Amino acid sequence: MTYFPNVGKISFSGNSLKSDLSFRYYNPDEVIAGKTMKDHLRFSVAYWHTFTQDGSDPFGSGTMIRPWNHLKGMDLAKARVEAAFEFFEKLGNPYFCFHDRDIAPEGDTLRETNKNLDVIVSMIKDYMKTSHVKLLWNTANMFTNPRFVHGAASSCNADVFAYAAAQVKKALEIAKELGAENYVFWGGREGYESLLNTDMKFEQENMARFFHMAIDYAKEIGFEGQFLIEPKPKEPTKHQYDFDAATTIAFLKTYDLDKDFKLNLEANHATLAGHTFEHEIRVARIHGLLGSLDANQGDPLLGWDTDEFPTDLYATTLTMYEVLKNGGLGKGGLNFDAKPRRSSFMPDDLFYSHIAGMDSYALGLKVANRLIEDRVFDDFIEERYSSYKEGIGAEIVSDRSSYHISINRCF
Ligand code: XLS
Ligand code: NI
Ligand code: NI
């Protein structure tokens, strides 16, 4: 069975653009600043948007035409795995990401749910043996099921905390089994709707306990992937605790988690927090906590997480500028946490939209590299702070290892 019969292997055609189903800028083997584009960009396909979204929104039902739409339950889950690996082979993305609930349906009990996961995980593992695709990260969906109405680790209900912990335990075992490079926490419902019924300090302490439990269990089972937290200011909660990069870093440092966690930053979440993506990346980078990126874009005219494929070349350029300045993303990558619009409902639109995102980032990488090579900003910035190179300026910053300077030095 083939799920995308109209599409062959997507290759680089350059500016000659032989077909719309080819890359104009993403040439995986092209070397830029000593590294291939493939290794710079580390593209990842998001399982949820690509294989499970149906195009519904708060005002209308699903529109997506998919060859697996007639199936249900485990048959549907298996068909999606087959379709996913056909898609990955054709697109040539080196990575993918998923939530536990994307890949297998929940059963009536935790035991049954985990059995469903075992079946699908072993199927994915088999496919991975003969595929070039690796798991960038997985995560636990602790926001869809009604039990998470008050949050997961920050829930007022201890049973829910315990259930969420059991879910993460299983998700970490899956991460280990499939060789995930990272493990992500996105706390969609870890926040509050009203301060009047909320013990904020207690909820945040519980989140810290939860993260420490995860770190300890990862050590116990020998999972060596990087732990990541994905900040977002709101939606679905009114106020999410991991509001933005700065807030999340303060949380990590307060609770002694900054040695074990880095950040997974998302462009659309930056927009919702009133920041640019490059601002969020810069904040993480200067603290040595840049982990991975959810590459998408928001619409500045809409106040929600529209998860569009990234096509704004200024944004992709400035993102790649920060990534290059960081010396790369390490174990992280560029995960397309993005979906085609509701009106782009044909299966092939999944390819067109990924190609648009990959080309936009490939071009962004090339331009960013030129900006660095030509020292466009570096020279300018150096000049801007040149008063700290001599006289009183040099005196103020003379001991770079300490911030304690006597005010008498300024006389
Ligand atoms: C939602 C988030 C989510 C995370 C993974 O806004 O972006 O998709 O990336 O749970
Ligand atoms: Ni995301
Ligand atoms: Ni998001």
Image (cartoon, rainbow, N blue to C red):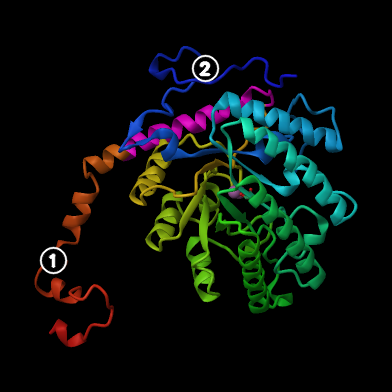
Mark 2, residue position: 20
Q: Quadrant of residue 363?
A: top left
Residue 409 image offset from top left, x and y in percent? 15, 83
Q: Nearer the viewer, residue 122 or 246?
A: 122
Q: Is residue 142 magenta?
A: no
Q: What is the spatial separation of the Cα atoms under label 2 and label 1, in whole angstroms?
A: 53 Å
Main secondary structure found in the magenta portion: helix
Give me the residue at 42% from left, 26% from top: 27
> Mark 2–mark 1 contact, CB under 8 Å?
no
Q: Is residue 347 magenta?
A: yes
**Could you say whether the residue bearing mark 2 is in a helix, strand or loop?**
loop
Q: Quadrant of residue 81?
A: top right
Residue 186 image offset from top left, x and y in percent? 63, 56
Identify which amino acid the numbered label 2 is placed on. Asp
* 303 versus 212 height, above or below: above
Give me the residue at 49% from left, 56% from top: 274
Give me the residue at 71% from left, 76% from top: 196
In the rendered structure, the answer to whether residue 119 lies left or right of residue 350 reads: right
Q: Quadrant of residue 203?
A: bottom right
Mark 1, residue position: 389
Which span is picked out in magenta? Answer: 345-368
In the rendered structure, the answer to whether residue 157 lies left or right of residue 19 reads: right
Residue at far top of view: 18
Residue 378 image offset from top left, x and y in percent? 23, 50
Mark 2 packing: few (<14 Cα in 10 Å), some, or many (20+)? few
Q: Nearer the viewer, residue 303 or 251?
A: 251
Q: Nearer the viewer, residue 53 or 113?
A: 113
